[in-house]
Image: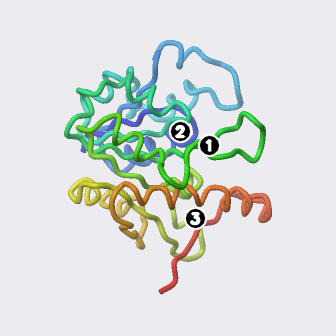
């Protein structure tokens, strides 16, 4: 499969690296590839990561999305609509758009609040803004490493998919299965993304209580 992973942060790198490892054609999208490669701030500049992942290409959001069969939004939830607009609605039309972001607002510090909840979700906002895309919300209830390597936990755990298009959810579930997820629950249409996005306040407080992000929910039934 040809994947575009939009976002060069920890989540985007985890998704892109794992997809490439599994044999997929992967292009990471960013606003300015030259600037992204030139950045030296932070503990892990993108260029250093890219040097160890020569099979992952880097391009603009527009170029990455245009050449992809499946687009993964791995950027900040706060900037999701702007980022996807930069990718181009025409480049998203008809394609599976996997959204793994959360509507987190850090303006008042930590822990963040949700800038949309209860009667709407970021997943729904994305679907409304890009009606031609086949949006699937998933993986937003996990830390980056467990998204792509769930066997980092001692037992199987649960992930969720929400979306209006059955075929898109099947494609997203196939990706999740390749990553190693064995319990994927289809919650229903894109409005059910409200539920998984609203898990984040619980997730954040669990992280604080447990002192680690290496955990996940398991639905026992």
Q: Disc 2 designates what residue?
A: 77
Give the position of the N terminus as an image quadrant: top left
Circle 3: element type: helix
Circle 2: element type: helix
Graded by Cα atoms within 10 Å as few (under 14), some (14 to 19) or many (20 or more), the crowding at tag 2 reads many
User: In this picture, is 109 found above or below 18?
Assistant: above
Q: Nearer the viewer, residue 6 or 132?
A: 132
Going from N to C along the chain, the mark reached first, 1 or 3, is 1
Image position, residue 112 (x, y; %): 71, 44
Q: Disc 1 designates what residue?
A: 104
**Residue 152, which numbered label?**
3
Q: CA distance from mark 3 to mark 2?
A: 25 Å
Going from N to C along the chain, the mark reached first, 1 or 2, is 2
User: In this picture, is 97 found above or below 41?
Assistant: below
Image position, residue 217 (x, y; %): 58, 70
**Residue 47, which numbered label?**
none
Residue 49 placement, left or right of 210: left
Q: Are marks 1 and 2 in contact (CB under 8 Å)?
A: yes
Quadrant of residue 155 within the rendered picture: bottom right
């Amino acid at each position: 499969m040809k994947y575009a992973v939009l976002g060069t942060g920890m989540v985007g790198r985890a998704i892109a690296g794992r997809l490439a490892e599994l044999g997929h054609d992967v292009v990471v999208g960013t606003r300015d590839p030259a600037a992204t490669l030139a950045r030296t701030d932070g503990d892990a500049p993108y260029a250093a990561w890219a040097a160890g992942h020569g099979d992952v290409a880097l391009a603009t959001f527009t170029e990455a999305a245009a050449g992809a069969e499946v687009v993964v939004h791995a950027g900040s939830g706060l900037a999701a609509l702007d980022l996807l607009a930069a990718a181009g609605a025409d480049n998203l039309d008809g394609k599976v758009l996997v959204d793994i972001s959360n509507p987190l607002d850090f303006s008042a510090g930590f822990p963040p609040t949700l800038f949309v909840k209860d009667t709407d979700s970021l997943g729904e906002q994305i679907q409304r803004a890009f009606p031609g895309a086949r949006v699937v919300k998933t993986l937003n209830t996990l830390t980056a490493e467990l998204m792509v390597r769930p066997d980092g936990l001692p037992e199987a755990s649960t992930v969720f998919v929400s979306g209006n298009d059955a075929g898109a959810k099947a494609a997203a579930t196939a990706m999740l299965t390749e990553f190693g997820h064995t319990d994927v629950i289809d919650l229903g249409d894109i409005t059910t993304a409200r539920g998984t996005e609203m898990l984040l306040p619980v997730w954040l407080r669990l992280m604080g209580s447990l002192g680690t992000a290496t955990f996940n929910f398991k639905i026992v039934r």
